[in-house]
Amino acid sequence: MPGPKGSTQSPQRVFSPFVSTVLTVIAPGLLGASVAQAARRHGAADRIKIWARRPETRLALNKSDWCDEAADTLSSAVEDANIVVVCTPVDRIIESIKSFSDSLGPDAVVTDVGSVKGEICRFASNALKNGAGFVGSHPMAGSEKSGMEHASADLFKDRPCFVTPLEQTPSESVDQVVSFWTRIGAEVVTLPPDRHDEIVAHISHLPHLAASALCSLMAGHDPSWRHYAGGGLRDTTRVAGGSPSLWLEILFENRDEVLRALASYQDELQGFHAALSNRDILQVKALLERGKDYRDQFRPR
Amino acid sequence: MPGPKGSTQSPQRVFSPFVSTVLTVIAPGLLGASVAQAARRHGAADRIKIWARRPETRLALNKSDWCDEAADTLSSAVEDANIVVVCTPVDRIIESIKSFSDSLGPDAVVTDVGSVKGEICRFASNALKNGAGFVGSHPMAGSEKSGMEHASADLFKDRPCFVTPLEQTPSESVDQVVSFWTRIGAEVVTLPPDRHDEIVAHISHLPHLAASALCSLMAGHDPSWRHYAGGGLRDTTRVAGGSPSLWLEILFENRDEVLRALASYQDELQGFHAALSNRDILQVKALLERGKDYRDQFRPR
């Protein structure tokens, strides 16, 4: 049973075959609040604690039905947690784990939702003491909108979620994290952190740069042009509306892989330019067909 | 009053202050059939004739309620037309106008729906005899789907439609074409054909190349990656699903402007690559912000 609303007491741990699960969410933005809402809806935790920096956020959390306790310190937030999900911006994940690592119980598992994994996984698995395990996660869910007010218990439903253990990560920790995401509706894909970073550089970070560069170019032309555009320009550039500060962090965290993916994209465009410039009809057609073949194999939604 | 279904007789022209309007559509694909359906719904023509190459298409047209006569020759299709809308693929517009120009009545006006305008407008305005006028059009409407079966009377509703007269085009002809598109729901923008070609190279042809190159690059990687992608890759690449043969025509018809726009896009991406490579945080941030500012000013829909 969840404790009384707004209680600041630690809940009693029930040491029985049916151990109650305490979920702690660090930072309730779009992703953090959605994790808590989804966990409540799917019964993935018996008790949900959320750490929030701002008093007004803690006040709002204590009034919500998907948070049993809003904690004002990281150590009180994590001390009795079975699973901790760190949902801070990607460049503050390591700092946050450092701050609470001493307060974790011995059977706690820690994960995060950062969109870049290599560095975080290597650091965090070294930083955790007391046998607590770290297993990186990256749910491929979100929107251009940010903030708790846009959160949804359905955010992870049928969305891919990467779980990125290192070779030495204990398999029980991996199982716990995989179960958690599965329970709240995600489709889990397990793979090494560096492989993850190469993949997201291509499927997420590069499309963002492609859209952003297109918008940045268009910004130098007559602003009325945008009103003439069909759905093509609109869809192709949608992601460029994302938060520049968030994307700046992501691009720098995954800088090496992003630079590699961007360079291959530049080569691909140069191939188009050369073929069109040389009036090489067959080559332009082959490139267009290769692109269409790829696009046509997306699952419809 | 429209004539009897399937009649092959020419309708009688009524020379009165209330002249009946005959609309001829050349080739009923997605755009052509939508023009006819929209004209019927909005009463933009009293009689609608459609030229179709295939007998089975003419049979289907004669059964529809938005075509009064399916013509099997271009000359019979246009002979009594007040307005002719050529909806063939862009590389067959000039050839089609050549074939029927001798059969046009003296007060007929001809337009088209081709997505490139410079060459077509210059040729067509020279080719038309008997005082018939040509005024190029380009409705910014369509979809990745093609063919009559996807046509809709709403296709042009609130969509921009370029009308591209030359300096010497008679203003009555321009007015007729502008009225026609306005009547079937489009928002008309009048501008010179070469300016049109520069604009669409940026707002339509370049986004297509950007999406196509992204897909062509991704086609060289593990096909399972696409299943991990969020909405970003999906939206950014949507237009790459368009017909390669259609886009091949468009890119070659507008080759010079497309090459110029593509080169500026390559410069923009090189700017991103250099800034990220040099760890120039301020410059990457400035590019992301410039992109977001542009994207945020799109009209919501």
Image (cartoon, coloured by chain):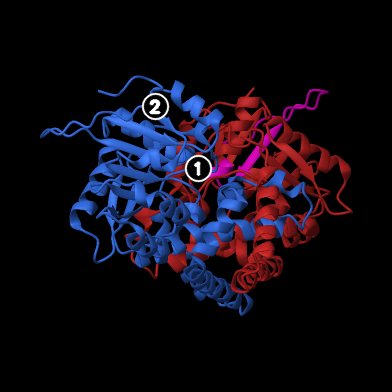
Chain colours: A blue, B red
Q: Which mark is residue A143?
A: 1
Point 70% across, 47% down: residue: A226
Q: Amino acid at mark 1?
A: Ser
Q: Position of residue B184 (x, y in %)?
A: 67, 32
Which dot, 2 or 1, sits closer to the camera? 2
| Residue A84: x %, y % from top left | 34, 44
**Gap in angstroms between the C-alphas marked 2 and 1:** 33 Å
Question: Quick one: label 2 or label 1, which is nearer the N terminus?
Answer: 2
Is residue A299 shown above or below B59? below
The magenta segment is: B7-32
Res B13 visible: yes
Magenta includes A15? no
By secondary structure, the bulk of the magenta-drawn segment is best described as loop
Q: Which residue is mark 2?
A: A8
| Badge 1 density bin: few <14, some 14–19, many ≥20, Cα 10 Å | some
The picture quadrant where one finds residue B257 is: bottom right
